[in-house]
Image (tube, rainbow, N blue to C red):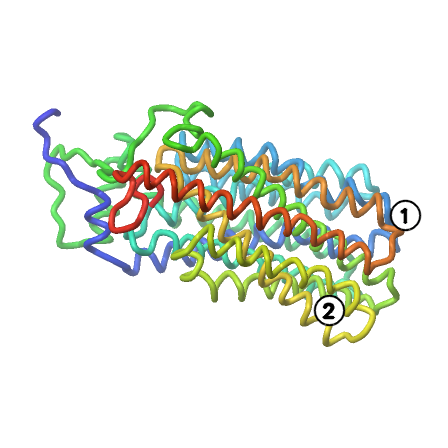
Amino acid sequence: MADAPVVPVSRLLNQRGLSGFHIKLLIWSLFIVLMDGYDIGAIAFAAPELVRTWGVDRGALGPVLSASNIGVLAGSALFGWVGDRYGRKAALIGSLLCFGVFTWIAAYSSNLDEMFWLRLLAGIGIGGAIPNIVALNAESAPRHLRATLALIAVGCVPIGGAIPGIVSATLVPYYGWQLLFLIGGIAPILIAIAAMIGLPESIKFMALHERHRAGMQRLIGEISPNFHVPPNAKFVIEDEKQFSGFNPVYLFRDGMALITPLLWLLFALNLMGFFFLLSWTPTLLTAAHLPPATAALAGASIQLGGTVGSLLMARWLARHRFLAISLLFVIAVPVVASIGFVGVASEAALLFATFIAGFCVLGIQSGINVAGALVYPTSLRANGSGWELGIGRLGSIVGPLLGALFVAMPVQQLYMWAALPFAVGAVVCFAIYRLNEARLAQRPWLREGGVPVAAE
């Protein structure tokens, strides 16, 4: 095998550029992340109905609103490992089936204890979607589009999160809160079944595993029909340093000793603030005597703003990464703090404020999902991203629980406190930016035309 011809996979992708294959991959990603976003957001929009129909206190909702994030804490690392060991496709199918089944069952729960455990189990599956979607798209794209295509792929998560708000405002009054979970359970199962046949595997993952040789040859033929793969060719990812197996220590090498833990903190801070907004906004605004439909639309507006922000800023975030994300953190602080004040003044102002809050906060999340994953090479990417999202979910657990502890506080004060994680996040993100620039300056071999080789 020493004399076998070599196929440089990254160069082949760069020479071919954007193709129909990438569009197909983005369409598959869209379906998957829509369901991921939907299942994360569904419980927040069901919460006001649970308070009314089950007669529970609002403060008792805290553990239920955090339950899926507790599951994600384990699921991100678990499915990150599955993705790096058995493939991005296998991990995504397993993720869809896991959260689809348990969300479906949640439609038949009859108390908060049952709902808590079902949301926790669903969260294990939810945790596997984003790390593997980012890896799948980044590893199949030409160099100059890796971050952009990954950002577009995950940028539609908020659309999925907005759909339960629309369902809540239009259909739940007629069919009950159970409809939210029936949709969120059946749809991902159907997508998983279809993905077994149609979802492509990551090109670079297949290049690292001999058992995927036949699939690799078919995929190269689809991407570049005029390229002939020599017999017994060896596929290599020539612009990335790879690691054999996985050890968490690998996440701290090559100048990442400080960057990796700061990334975990960054994820925790943004997810803390985001999940407070996502989980409590419909309930808090309903308690502030706004119409339930308005409260639901405000929650949906956060998600819609996030979609617009993620997609409009994709190229800017792909180019400037941590520096651009730092600026978004700064802007998010006054916007989030204002929600409690405008919410009692004007419905139009409330929807505008929640839209801009989503624009910033979910733009931040899309940006760190991709920028954080791309600092690691292919052999570590799903694991690295999974650990970021998994440990970051500690913040998403704390956010709703803090909301439950201080739910009696005036709504204006609550949203001012909710802006604090974004203020700290701005400082942490800028520190990551400076550390990463220093890391690349000390390791010029990681750059190629100003782009980190091991990261991009």
Residue 259 relative to residue 158: left or right: left
Which label sits on residue 141?
none
User: In this rendering, is residue 190 above or below 114?
Assistant: below
Specify few, some or many for label 1: CA neighbours under 10 Å numbering under 14, 14-19, or 20 or more.
few
Specify few, some or many for label 2: CA neighbours under 10 Å numbering under 14, 14-19, or 20 or more.
few
Question: Residue 126 at what x, y percent from top left?
Answer: 58, 43
Between 287 and 105, the residue placed more toward the observer is 287
Which label sits on residue 170?
2
Question: Residue 221 at what x, y percent from top left?
Answer: 20, 50
> What quarter of the picture does the C terminus occupy?
top left
Residue 293 can be seen in this image: no
Q: Residue at x 81, y 73 (%)?
A: 345
Residue 305 relative to residue 249: left or right: right
Question: Residue 218 at what x, y percent from top left?
Answer: 23, 45
Question: Residue 296 at what x, y percent from top left?
Answer: 74, 64
Between 230 and 433, the residue placed more toward the observer is 433
Q: Residue furthest left?
A: 3
> Where does label 1 land, which residue?
57
User: In this rendering, is residue 18 above or below 267?
Assistant: below
Query: Mark 2 is on which residue type?
Result: Thr
Query: Mark 1 is on which residue type?
Result: Asp
Q: Residue at x 77, y 65 (%)?
A: 295
- Looking at marks 2 and 1 on the same chain, the residue that comes earlier in the sequence is marked by 1
